[in-house]
Each structure stands twice: as C-alpha cells, then as structure tokens.
Image (spheres, rainbow, N blue to C red):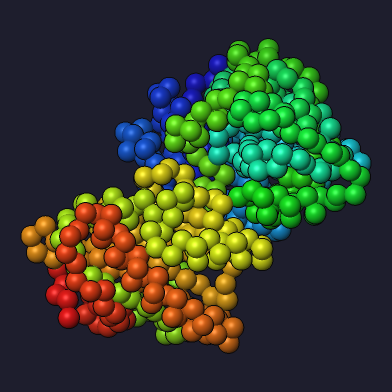
Amino acid sequence: MVEMNRILVTGATGYVGGRLIPRLLARGYRVRAFGRSVGKMACRAWASHPNAELAEGDVLDVRALFEAARGCDAAYYLVHSMVAQKGRYAEADRRGALNMRAAAEAADLKQVIYLGGLGDGHHHAISRHLKSRHEVGDILRSGSVPTTVLRAAMIIGSGSASFEILRYLVERLPVMITPRWVRTPTQPIAIDNVLGYLIGCLGNDGAMGKTLDIGGPDIVNYETLIQLYAEEAGLPRRRVIPVPVLTPTLSARWIHLVTPVPSSIALPLTEGLSVPTTCADDQIRGVVDEKLIPCRQAIRTALDRILEKQVETCWSDAGELQPPAWTTCGDAPYAGGTVLNCGYRLVLDASCEQTWRHVERIGGARGYYFGDGLWRLRGLLDRLVGGVGLRRGRRHPERLRTGDALDFWRVLNLEMNRRLTLVAEMKMPGEALLDIQLAPSGQNRCELRMVARFLPRGLGGLVYWYVLSPFHVWIYQGMLKAIARRAGATRTTRPTRFDPEDRKACAWTPGTSTRMS
C-alpha cells in the first residue's frame, strides 16, 4: 500500500463526490474538496470537519486545478460536464481531463482515481456519451501519474439520475411501450459498493495504473429491473412491451415528460442503453474485498432512504451556482438591461424564527402555500417546452442548503431565519430571482418581504413580465398571508407594495427593522 494523507476530490458537490468525502474523512484522511461554489460546499455537513478544506474552482480553469492539487497525495476525478454543459459535454470533459492530467503531474501525485462507464468502446452502437467517458479515462492514463479507472454501469442509489428514471417510470406507468434495449444485459451496482471500491483502490498497489470493471453480483436487463422495483415498491407487476421504432431521442423526450430528469441528461443515457454493460472480468475482486449488494437489496435500500428523507446527495446537486450579474441592487445598468421587480411586505405577530420554518419548507410536495394550481400549471408548461418543471421537488422536506434544486428554482443564497434567495431555472425569456426576506420588527414581530426580480431578454421578455404582473400581485400577496397563518400569526398588516430598487429598500437588510408605510 502507498501511504496517502491529503486527498483532492473534484466534483465535491456531485452525486458520488458528495458521498465519498465524508467517508474519506471518517477514515482519517485529510480532504481538499474542489468545486465551483464554496457556498454550495460550505452547506454540506462534512464542510465543518477539521480535516476538510474547501477549494473553489472549475476543472476547465487549469490554474485553479493546479493550485488545488498542490500538496495533495492523490486525487479523485469525479467530474462530468453533462449537467453543466449539456450538449457540449464531450469537449468540456476532454479539456477537464487534460487539465487534471497536467495538474497531477505538476503536483507529483501518487495516484489519480477516475470513475467512468462500462461498455465496449469498439461496439458498433457505442454512444457519444460512453465514448466520452472512455476518452477521459484514456487521457488520464496517458500521463505519468498512475491512474486507476473504475468503470461502472447503472448506479443504484437514492438520488442517482438512473435510479430516478427507473423510479418514476415504474411508479407512473403500469404499461410501458419501450425500445428493444429494455432487454439489453447490464450489471448494476449499488452506490455503497461504488464508494467501497473507490476507497479500497486508494493507495492500493494492485489498483495502480489499472482499468477495472466494477459491478454488482447480478447480471439483469432493464425489464427485470423494472419488475424488481415494482415488487419492492409494492406495486402490481408492470407490463413491458418492447417495440423497434422508439429512437433514443423519442425515449429521452418521454423520460423528460414522465420523470424529473431533463432530456439533456436522459438522451446521452438512453443512447448507450443498447450496448451491453457488463463486467468483462472480475479483476477488482482480487484487488478490493467488497461485499456486493444484490439488485433487489440495493433497490430496497434506496427506497428506504427516500421514504426516511435521508437522501445524502442527488443528481440535481450538480451544476454551476453562479449568481446573475444583475442580482446586486443597483447593478442593472452595468448588467446591460433594466431589472423589473415586484415587491410586497407585511408585518406579523410572530418571531422570525417561527416564520422561517415555513419559508424554508416552501415547494416540493408542500407547494407554495397559495395559488398552487397556477404553480403546477407553470411547471407543466415549463416541462412541455423542455424545462425542468416541478418534478425535481426538494432533497429534504424541511431543510434547504445553498445549491439545492427546489422544483424549477435553485437555492442561490440562504441565511437562516433571515433570507432565502431562489434563482429560476425554468424556461423563460429572461432571468429571474425570488427573494424572501425576514427581519425583526419590534418585540416578537417580524417583517416578511417577498421580492421578484426579472431581467427581460428582448421584447418577448417584456411581454412575458407585464402579462404575468397581475398574477404576481395576487400570488405574492396571497403567499405572504399564507406564510403568516402557517407561522401562527393572529394579526398582520395588510400586504403592501414597495419598490425594491428604492435606495432605502436596497439598504434594508435582514436583521434591520423597517417601519411599514
């Protein structure tokens, strides 16, 4: 074994990276977590660990990656640009891999570990996505630093994109007309086994410079997985009808409509499903002693985590969290446009702590407290035009953290008992924020503000904003009153409009009392 001390983990807020880091810390390693947003990483429970270090940067920024690798002994490369770059992911992944190879050599790392995808790279039906996964591994292995490439098929775990597709399809469709690839053999692996192999290969002489296939104990097809899920979820057996006419594009669009996973992610995944993804050998078993979890048990565990609201990480965690340039009050002229806004406020006889509990629970299954029919309609329309819609829901029913996906929003900023700022990820002709602010207003009283900001894109953006303005007035006033009721307030002021761009309004910050006009 090669002694390792400080470990660099790229993709720290991704599905696998976010679960790997706490397990490395629990084993006594010092971990440098590398991600595009320190704010997102700082919200993770492991961020406060004394052996955890946060480093902000992008693998496409070679200087940031060089700096992050300096002083480390080994690195995990767990970056995939499919969420952030969408159709341009292959080129981005190629550049990221080249940068990682150079950074590893410059820092004189002892090992790089990369998690790629299973599938014969020479198969006639190999997808662009799987080709890219293999290419990344080849680039990393071509450097002077010993690289371990672990290749996995479908990962079964609560929150993984593949599992979410399976879950929603089975739960919503008692009869499925599917492509013929539904009977393609595959060798899924439980997320716990993936993490076990990733950790077991660290510093392991038998893994150095090797490409190792990892899979669970069962070779199945996707139809079998569908029936296994139905059984574990207590659902009637699903009827699966394979047909030869469904293309990957049609399949991806159908997945987009039925599940929370957008077509930009579903398409690369479905394109590769016609290629068998089974392990070519079991070399890994002689390198790492790992007790493999059968498919049925892995599905049951994932369902239990979902029911218990204990989903550690989710596919939607990935992606860049970058505040729009115009979000700071008064910045619109420099951002190249006029920010339109709508702000309402009221004072209620409840503390900010009482009120915050209900602000933080907004969205997901609980809804938006008022006008839920219109919210659902907006989510449906967004889904129909290729947006994320409302199906992403929430990671946890009561707690939010910076970077969380929340229906068709993402948490941009969160200050406990003070402020929740959401940036819109729905399809629209412009950029939008929803800002909910709280501040004490006398003894056991709280001022609650709701501000919508919108930077229109062209004439269509202006029309969009002004057509919806009457609904904004009705919905935001209703939401304020509904949140006040949930907080137990018996007396409130009437919701009144204010100008969020007013100098005094801009200077108002949570924690500073403001008299109602």
In the rendered image, is residue 505 in sight?
A: yes
| Residue farthest along the left direction in this orientation | 443
| 342 up-or-down from 364: above or below | below
The residue drawn where x is 72% and y is 39% is 174
Task: Give coordinates of residue 79: x percent, y percent.
Answer: 60, 44
Q: The C terminus appears in which quarter of the rendering?
A: bottom left
- The residue drawn where x is 20% and y is 58% is 489
Residue 499 x/y as whole percent: 30, 82
How many dots with numbers? 0
**Which residue is most to the bottom?**
459
Residue 39 higher or lower than 463, as above or below: above
Q: Residue at x 74, y 55 (%)?
A: 253
Residue 219 lies, in percent from the top left, at 77, 22
**494 vs 81, nearest the viewer:** 494
In which quadrant is the N terminus drawn? Answer: top right
Say which residue appears at 37% left-offset and 38% top-offset.
45
Q: Quadrant of residue 216?
A: top right
Nearer to the camera, 481 or 146? 481
Residue 199 image offset from top left, x and y in percent = 54, 24
Depicted 455 relative to depicted 151: above or below:
below
Residue 345: name its quadrant: bottom left
In front of the other: 407 or 453: 407
Closest to the observer, 465 or 508: 465
**Residue 410 vs residue 505: left or right?**
right
Q: Would residue 34 be seen by someone viewing this image from the given angle? A: no
Residue 193 vs residue 278: left or right?
left
